[in-house]
Image (tube, rainbow, N blue to C red):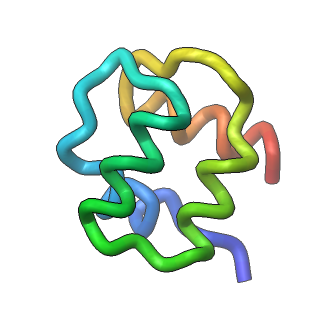
């Protein structure tokens, strides 16, 4: 089952943007994200994200 943007947003709340995958993963782990969310973050492109919306766009591109 695909992860919804709302589910991801819940776990990356608190990220200081701009952020890279490591920053997103760290915040998600601090917010007790399940492995499914961590896997999704791991599959994001290696670049800086300027906002949660920017992360969401990248997710749409990989799904």
Q: Is residue 20 above or below residue 38?
A: above
Image quadrant assignment for residue 18? top left
Q: Horizontally, is 27 left or right of 8 in the view?
A: left
Q: Is residue 11 above or below residue 14?
A: below
**Residue 60 percent coordinates (x, y):** 70, 44
Judge by depth and name the residue closer to the eye, 12 or 21: 21
The residue at 67%/49% (across/down) is: 42
Judge by depth and name the residue closer to the eye, 20 or 7: 20
Q: Horizontally, is 45 left or right of 57 in the view?
A: right
**Residue 52 percent coordinates (x, y):** 39, 35
The residue at 65%/57% (across/down) is: 40
Image quadrant assignment for residue 1? bottom right
Residue placed farthest to the right in the image? 62
The residue at 36%/62% (across/down) is: 29
Count the numbered circles shown: 0
**Residue 5 percent coordinates (x, y):** 49, 57
Residue placed farthest to the bottom in the image? 1
**Residue 53 percent coordinates (x, y):** 44, 32
Image quadrant assignment for residue 32? bottom left
Q: Horizontally, is 28 left or right of 2 in the view?
A: left
Q: Is residue 62 above or below residue 20?
A: below
The residue at 37%/25% (across/down) is: 51
Q: Horizontally, is 8 left or right of 39 in the view?
A: left
């Amino acid at each position: 089952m695909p992860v919804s943007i709302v589910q991801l947003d819940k776990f990356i709340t608190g990220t200081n943007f701009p952020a890279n995958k490591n920053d997103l993963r760290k915040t998600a782990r601090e917010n007790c994200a399940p492995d499914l969310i961590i896997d999704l973050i791991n599959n994001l492109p290696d670049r800086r994200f300027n906002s949660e919306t920017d992360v969401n766009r990248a997710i749409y591109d990989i799904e």
